[in-house]
Image (cartoon, grey):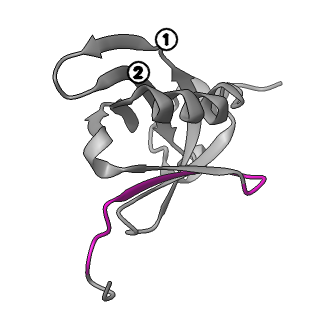
Amino acid sequence: MTNNEISNVVLFKRGDGDKFEFDDKFVGLKALDEDMFVFTVNAPQEIVGKSMIFFEGLKMFEPVKVDIGGTGDIPCYFKGVSPIVNKGSNGLGNNAFFTITLQELKNPPKFEEEHECVNCGFHNFTA
């Protein structure tokens, strides 16, 4: 793979180095407001079972990084995983389905530096 090619791997990484990767043919992505990402996994049951060991071990708001196609790590917070839905045999094998929700980790703005007003409650508050 050359430097400007995108791979077919979606890689999730924990802070302790533990990781799980999917072939991108099993993963869909939907970006929502508030920097939320919902990854849809539709894969053979054995892959889903192995991946759930990784995702069920994550705690709410635990930092996790996701690398889509080798384009670089996106730091996120883990928000949750849905229950597994068994799709059953549909001629394509015995697939199962679940979703992973992450929120992109961004540094909060420095409120005082970006806040412009005249005599608002924030500046008039004294502790």
Left or right of 60 in this view: 113: left
Is 65 or 69 nearer to us in this picture?
Answer: 69
Residue at which label 1 appears: 83
Callout 2 amino acid: Phe
Left or right of 25 in this view: 124: right
Q: How many marks?
A: 2
Residue at which label 2 appears: 98
Say few, some or many: other residues with alpha carbon within 10 Å of mark 2 (under 14 / 14 to 19 / 20 or more): some
Q: Position of residue 12 (x, y in %)?
A: 54, 49
First in sequence, mark 1 or 2: give its number.
1
- Residue 94's image quarter? top left
Callout 1 amino acid: Pro
Q: Position of residue 20 (x, y in %)?
A: 57, 48
- Residue 29's image quarter? top left
**What residue is drawn where x is 41% and y is 21%?**
98
Q: Residue 14 shows which numbered tag? A: none
Is 86 or 24 nearer to us in this picture?
Answer: 86
Q: Where 81 sits versus 27, above or below?
A: above
Q: Secondary structure at mark 1?
A: loop
Q: Which residues are magenta?
A: 5-17
Q: Going by the picture, which residue comes out furthest to the right?
A: 127
Q: Quadrant of the N terminus?
A: bottom left
Q: Position of residue 111 (x, y in %)?
A: 57, 44
Task: Please say whether residue 104 is one of the residues in the magenta stretch.
Answer: no
Q: CA distance from mark 1 to mark 2?
A: 6 Å
**What residue is drawn where x is 49% and y is 31%?**
46
Q: Are marks 1 and 2 in contact (CB under 8 Å)?
A: yes
